[in-house]
Image: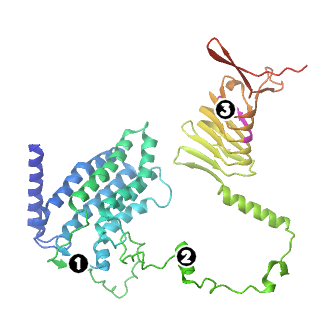
Amino acid sequence: MERKLIERLEAAVERLEALSAGGVSARGLSDSGVEVASDPSIVAFDDLMAQYAARVSGAAEKIGGQVLDVTKILLEAFSVQKKLLIEIKQTQKPDMAGLAEFLKPLNEVIMKVNAMTEGRRSDFFNHLKSAGDSLSALAWIAYTGKDCGMSMPIAHVEESWQMAEFYNNKVLVEYRNKDQNHVEWAKALKELYLPGLRDYVKSHYPLGPVWSASSKKASSAPSKAPPPGAPAPPPPPPASLFSSEPSQPSSSRPKQGMSAVFQEINTGNVTAGLKKVTADMKTKNRTDRTSVVSASEKEMRSSSSSFSKAGPPKLELQMGRKWVVENQIGRKNLVIDDCDAKQSVYVFGCKDSVLQIQGKVNNITIDKCTKMGVVFKDVVAACEIVNCNGVEVQCQGSAPTISVDNTSGCQLYLSKDSLGASITTAKSSEINVLVPAAESDGDWGEHSLSQQYIHVFKDGQFETTPVSHSGG
């Protein structure tokens, strides 16, 4: 305990010496920064970084790549917030336009992380989104009062982390049994905010930042005109995280949606804005309508409705691990040929289509498909058929387990290598298994799996046997 106290005092002395030697800070602050640097809230922020941010950085260095890059930007954002907290203690509270300019350095760093999540989806997308969404918690520094449109600082930090936790949990699940460095990074990132930043804000700024009452005002630097012959300035950046426009109280905003409807009813003049319906506008009197629907119009309606319900068709590899085949209708030539034993295949919502999987995969799941055919070679774990109707599945290689659940109508074609497969059925009917004949030119043998059972209580327990039908 005494050793930690000595280290903190030595660090505080080093900061004071550095500030004393520098004279004026990068943003034009005077030597009064020496006193501010020793303020308990600033010292506590350094402790926050030393205790929690160091863990995130350490785990990121073991991972490297984009995870290390985004972590460096994240720590840069915390460093910028510390500088802003020092300046707040030496600056009078600005207006909303001045506040947006004052917080611009922090917003620029946050935009760097957001830019990393755009474009082509990275293998570390969940890491990038988790770090990027979490940085919105630093916006607590923009809280100016209950009418500013933000939650209280402590609540804002917690709410911001809830938004980032969705992707953080994905990292934990994905790497739980693969790489503990990623798990450590995700856990350390959460602790940086909860309890780290939340407890810091709770202890020092529960009602928002405390601006100086006697120091100079925060002023935005005047924009300089470009010299003759210089290129035009770049377009304005995207919308800032910190808006310069004050948010209006809910009572002064124009009502929208159902609130506007009820407000109009309360005025008593409900029909004032309605148009008069004349006789020629009524459906029975219109000459431009016919009761006959053309075949092309009917097909167009059905195709548009099916698309809106099912969603767009997909056949893609996600995160390098999972092949997704969704909403394919009437496609007989679907092929997955670039696959390996670590990848899984998920087929969902397909109809009247055929999919060929030309390689060994870890797992195959066929969900909510109708009249769907799937042909695969080898599967490491299992082939699962769930919530389907009238599907055909053929195994050309080996499959240790095949499960059929809540399915009506399923044809299973087994190869000689997959005859030892364990087939599990539940809440399913019309399940037929076809096996190859002993001779190479023989016919397939068809066997139906029982869906009716007899349960007899015997010797203190129930004995279950399938029902067998014999024809006379």
Secondary element at tag 2: helix
Mark 2, mark 3: which one is toward the viewer? 2
- Please name the amino acid that badge 3 sits on: Ala
Name the residue carrying label 3: 426
Of the two numbered discs 1 and 2 on the same chain, state the one appearing first in sequence: 1
Q: CA distance from mark 1 to mark 2?
A: 45 Å
Q: Nearer the viewer, mark 3 or mark 1?
A: 3
Q: Please report the residue visible at 31 percent of the width from the left and 49 percent of the height from the top.
A: 191
Question: Residue at point 11% right, 43% down?
Answer: 1
Magenta stretch in the rendered image: 389-398
User: Which residue is drawn at the image coordinates 11% and 65% (left, top)?
Assistant: 19
Please tell me in which quadrant of the rendered image residue 457 appears. Answer: top right
Q: Kindly report the distance in space between the C-alpha atoms of the residues bearing marks 2 and 3.
A: 52 Å
Quarter residue 405 falls in: top right
| Quadrant, the C terminus | top right
**Left of 263 or right of it: where is 297?**
right
Which three-letter amino acid code belongs to the residue tagged 2? Phe
106 or 198, nearer to the observer: 198
The residue furthest top is 459
Element at badge 3? strand
Report the amino acid beneath label 1: Ala
Residue denoted by label 1 = 218
Position of 50 with respect to 370 (left or right) is: left
Which residue position is annotated with label 2?
262
Are circles 3 and 1 on residues that touch, CB within 8 Å? no
